[in-house]
Image (cartoon, rainbow, N blue to C red):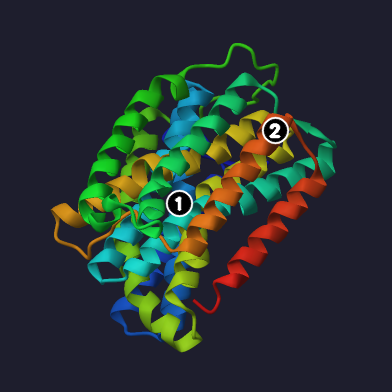
Amino acid sequence: MSVEQTSGQTFIRSDLVVIGGGAGLCVLAGIAHYGNWNSVVSFLVSAAAVCLLASLVGRSVEQLGDRFGPGATGVLQSALGNLPELFICIFALKSGLVDVVRAALIGSILANLLLVLGLAFLVGGLKHGTQKLGSERARTISVLMLLSVTAMAIPSIAHEVHSPAGSHEVAFSVIVSIILLALFALSLPFSLRRDPDSTEVVETEPPRWPVWLAITMLAVAGALAAFVSDWFVKALEPAMDTLNISPVFAGLVIVAIAGNAVENVVGVQLAARGQSEYAFSVILNSPIQIALVLAPALVLISQIFGLASLTLVFGPMLVVSLMLSVILAAAIAQDGESTWLEGATLIALYGIIATSFWWG
């Protein structure tokens, strides 16, 4: 494998490709934005830049995680990997695209539970046969995921059944958001601890980047993500009109996949290497953090900074799709193993759900 030396540290070519590609696409996205390029072209360039920046965030976190263990790596990858989506949603709320943000939050969870998990099962199953998911850690994470996503959906259920709480949509969503953030803080000790019962060997390469470089790359990628996300959102609305894409589909599929590029790649790579338990934990960590951190944080940010008001009340079809997907993922975890056919079925289900929202 080709390598190059930077500041006395060894970098494989893929590191330099991600860094150089991310910088180049950010420059191109800026030129497209300020040069008033065609909205569709500007949108595509910005989306590609967001994906590469998410990949750079993931690479930086991985280098930091090499020092702190797989538990911390999973939490950091999920938390910081959601940075691009956080910025996209904030700028979307600033532009009044509340439906896009709501759909993006649900879409991110669906993409992880159906598309990414399905790809991990498919790739890992075809390469290694039936994969075991039976560690106590994976089972506990699946239960926490089920509970956290259900808690996030309670305001929607209250709204649909016309309960007294349903008429206090904003206040109820704010209270639920504070509780969910507190629950996330309580879940950190479990998420960060090592799993002594796991028989799976997690193969990690020796750290190549010094800590200062990983933190610097993380900070630069985060700052660039803020700018690119703004350009992405400003190109999104005219691109939706040009391509005749509904706001719900744009949020559910396009924003969700672009903003979660880290988990999309990392989870499948782990499964391909035969690290099925670790892949399962990393993939499910993202829905947990979306439900416990990203969605509540956006609700509070929208109220505090006077953006378009976001609540935790989602459309019935979104809630039904969400709950079915969560139950399926939990059932697979309880079964303790996965096959490539289960993966193909999850991907097919994601395609059907995504298609159902094409018209709005």
Please tell me which residue lies in front, 161 or 272: 161
Residue 53 placed where, x, y %? 43, 54
Given the image, on which type of amino acid does mark 2 rest? Ser
Disc 1 crowd rating (10 Å Cα; few below 14, some 14-19, many 20+) is many
Figure check: 104 above or below 132: below
Q: Position of residue 9 (x, y in %)?
A: 48, 32
In the image as oriented, which residue stretches furthest toward the top?
A: 196
| Residue under numbered circle 1 | 54
Foreground residue among 20 and 323: 323
Question: Viewed as shown, does residue 69 lie left or right of 235?
Answer: right
The answer for how far apart the CA atoms under marks 1 and 2 are is 23 Å
Decide: few, some or many residues near mark 2? Use Cα within 10 Å; few <14, some 14-19, many ≥20.
many
Quarter of the image with the N terminus in it = top right
Residue ID at (80%, 41%): 339
Q: Is residue 343 something one can see in this rendering?
A: yes
**Which residue carries the number 2 mark?**
276
> Where in the figure is residue 335, as x and y percent of width and height?
73, 31
Question: Could you say whether the residue bearing mark 2 is in a helix, strand or loop?
Answer: helix
Three-letter code, disc 1: Ala
